[in-house]
Image (cartoon, helix red, strand yellow):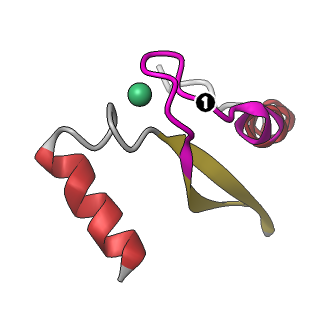
Amino acid sequence: MAPNPIPPLALREFLDFLREQSQQLRHCPECGSVFEHLIATFLLYGETWDIALPVCPKCDLRSSSHTVVAQKAAA
Ligand SMILES: [Zn+2]
């Protein structure tokens, strides 16, 4: 049985929701630090969404994998 594809409309709504929410998040709920934002571009059927993903400079950059991502973004 083939997996059901996710309807494009649902994905668009999700990306719109994500973009709205990411703009409203200013402070980390864990430590209260001001979020930094990493711009991520999502492509879907020829449309693009530039979404500023909130990253806490204290909590999210603890692990080495996140540090590598942050360094690449800054380069
Ligand atoms: Zn934090």
The reply to whether the magenta stretch includes residue 53 is no
Mark 1 residue's CB less than 8 Å from ligand 1: no
Instruction: Point out residue 47 in the picture as x, y percentages from the top left corner.
Output: 82, 64
Residue annotated with mark 1: 27
At horizontal 79% and vertical 69% (from top left) the residue drawn is: 46
Depth check: give the residue in front, 33 or 16.
Answer: 33
Residue 48, compared with residue 8, is above or below; it is: below
At horizontal 33% and vertical 61% (from top left) the residue drawn is: 70
At horizontal 43% and vertical 21% (from top left) the residue drawn is: 31
At horizontal 55% and vertical 42% (from top left) the residue drawn is: 35
Residue 71, compared with residue 53, is above or below; it is: below
Depth check: give the residue in front, 13 or 68.
Answer: 68
Q: How many neighbours does mark 1 have within 10 angstroms: few (below 14), some (14-19), or many (20 or more)? A: some
Magenta region: 20-36
Figure quadrant of the C terminus: bottom left
Is 75 on the left or on the right of 33, as rendered? left
Q: Secondary structure at mark 1?
A: loop
Instruction: Point out residue 5 in the picture as x, y percentages from the top left corner.
Output: 64, 32
Farthest left residue in view = 64
**Magenta residues: mostly which secondary structure?**
loop
Q: Quadrant of residue 30?
A: top left
Is 35 on the left or on the right of 22, as rendered? left
Quarter for ligand 1? top left
Farthest bottom residue in view = 75
Q: How many marks?
A: 1
Depth check: give the residue in front, 65 or 62.
Answer: 62
* Amino acid type at mark 1: His
Q: Quadrant of residue 7?
A: top right
Instruction: Point out residue 66 in the picture as x, y percentages from the top left corner.
Output: 26, 49
Is 72 on the left or on the right of 39, as rendered? left
